[in-house]
Image (cartoon, rainbow, N blue to C red):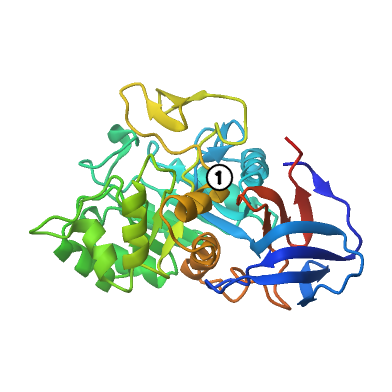
């Protein structure tokens, strides 16, 4: 993605199809007027001059789970420079806003990630996602199993002292009910992930503040005849949201469609992307393991999935072209639903007058051509 494109203080973009958000169908031939980082007008195209033209304009994509991009991994150097490179690379996949994601690491090293996000000054970063270390040793996935551990009072103090949005992935069977209650009461968004929890544990967790499930189907207990597990709980409980990785490597297209149909309005797209995305590198080190990209799949040397090489625009196109859902619904999964999970649906996830100008602009193949973040236009360089 190029540096931002200089535009007038007040400018107009043409949308061949404008998706207003919320799963609503597209409006044809629309003009969106932007001034001082906000949308000030939306109306039928009138033939006047415009400053930019796009086939599709949609609410800006929000990625709740992004580990790295642009040849950097947040875990390696959790600081402002790393965040800036992730933000810039993520734009090439249509992402306007994100939660830098810090996975399981030794001790309380996650405190550095919390501090880095608190110090970030910009509209792109909406908070932070801590995925671990409070996970199940039975479901480590690619996380370093040696550093998975229970939550103690020192962790509680660090987490409760954080100021800003925090999505925390835990294995609910490994975290006490009182801890869950205190974290939820502080406004921390609790998701279950890397968990072997059964249905009863999931029910109790929801009662104490659990809000959703991280990367549905992956590294969690599955739906079986005698216990619905984490997957079944997500399907059955309307209070639970979930993220899902739509790259065809993590979840089969038929299961993407099944999850969408069972959780419509509660299921969002996440990238789970890694340093290879938005860069020329094809491998990197993570927690002492060599991770390599082959045929679009990131994996460890022993063949385990290790995050994704994925932009949210590609995730949207997979949902449409391979899972067979409507474009409006797929776009909502990348914008409005994550905004709702974070409690900011009054600001993001819809194109409307008075809202921040946060827009993802695509071609007819659902490939990113530009993003607009707080009114600033970033255009993708021609291939």
How many labels were placed on the picture? 1
- Write down the quadrant of residue 376 in the picture: bottom right
Q: Is residue 64 above or below residue 92?
A: below
Q: Which of the pair 379/24 is nearer the observer?
A: 24
Q: Determine whether, in the image, residue 196 is placed left or right of residue 291.
A: left
Circle 1: element type: loop
Task: Give the residue pinned by disc 1.
Answer: 311
Q: Position of residue 162 (x, y in %)?
A: 50, 59
Residue 344 placement (x, y as % from top left): 56, 71
User: Which quadrant, please, contains the N terminus?
Assistant: top right
**Which residue is depicted at the point 40% across and 23% down?**
288
Residue drawn at x 48%, y 55% is 320
* Left or right of 213, for residue 12: right
Asked if residue 177 can be seen in this view, the reply is: no
Please tell me how crowded label 1 is: few (under 14), some (14-19), or many (20+) other residues with Cα within 10 Å: many
Query: Residue 161's spot in the image, x, y percent?
Result: 48, 60
Quarter where residue 352 is shown: bottom right
Please identify the residue farthest to the left as the structure is shown.
226
In this view, 268 is above or below 140: below
Q: Which x, y percent locates residue 4?
A: 80, 48
Quadrant that contains the C terminus: top right
* Residue 148 seen in render: yes
- Residue at 62% in and 36% down: 278
Q: Which residue is drawn at 39% across and 34% down?
A: 306
Q: Taking 326 as reference, is 234 left or right?
A: left
């Amino acid at each position: 993605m190029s540096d931002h494109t200089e535009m007038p203080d007040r400018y107009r973009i043409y949308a061949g199809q404008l998706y207003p958000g919320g799963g609503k169908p597209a409006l044809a031939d629309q003009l969106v007027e932007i001034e001082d980082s906000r949308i000030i007008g939306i109306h039928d195209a009138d033939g006047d001059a415009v400053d930019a033209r796009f086939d599709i304009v949609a609410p800006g994509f929000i990625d709740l789970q992004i580990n790295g991009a642009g040849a950097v991994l947040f875990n390696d150097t959790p600081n402002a420079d790393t965040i800036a490179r992730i933000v810039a690379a993520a734009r090439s996949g249509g992402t306007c806003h994100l939660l830098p994601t810090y996975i399981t690491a030794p001790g309380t090293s996650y405190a550095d990630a919390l501090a880095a996000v608190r110090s970030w000054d910009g509209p792109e970063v909406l908070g932070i996602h801590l995925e671990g270390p409070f996970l199940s040793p039975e479901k480590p996935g690619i996380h370093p199993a040696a550093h998975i551990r229970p939550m103690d009072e020192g962790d509680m103090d660090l987490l409760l002292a954080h100021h800003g949005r925090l999505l925390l992935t835990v294995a609910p069977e490994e975290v006490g009910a009182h801890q869950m209650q205190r974290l939820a009461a502080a406004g921390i968004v609790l998701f279950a992930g890397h968990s072997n929890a059964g249905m009863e544990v999931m029910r109790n967790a929801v009662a104490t503040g659990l809000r959703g499930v991280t990367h549905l189907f992956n590294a969690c207990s599955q739906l079986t005849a005698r216990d619905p597990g984490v997957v079944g709980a997500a399907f059955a409980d309307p209070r639970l949201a979930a993220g899902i990785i739509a790259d065809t490597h993590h979840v089969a297209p038929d299961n993407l469609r099944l999850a969408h149909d069972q959780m419509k309005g509660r299921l969002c797209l996440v990238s789970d992307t890694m340093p290879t995305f938005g860069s020329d590198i094809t491998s990197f080190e993570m927690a002492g393991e060599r991770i390599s990209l082959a045929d679009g799949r990131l994996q460890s040397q022993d063949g385990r999935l290790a995050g994704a090489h994925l932009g949210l625009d590609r995730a949207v196109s997979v949902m449409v072209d391979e899972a067979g859902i409507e474009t409006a619904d797929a776009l909502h999964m990348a914008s409005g639903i994550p905004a709702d999970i974070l409690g900011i649906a009054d600001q993001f996830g819809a194109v409307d007058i008075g809202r921040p100008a946060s827009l993802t602009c695509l071609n007819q193949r659902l490939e990113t051509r530009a993003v607009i973040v707080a009114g600033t236009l970033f255009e993708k360089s021609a291939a």
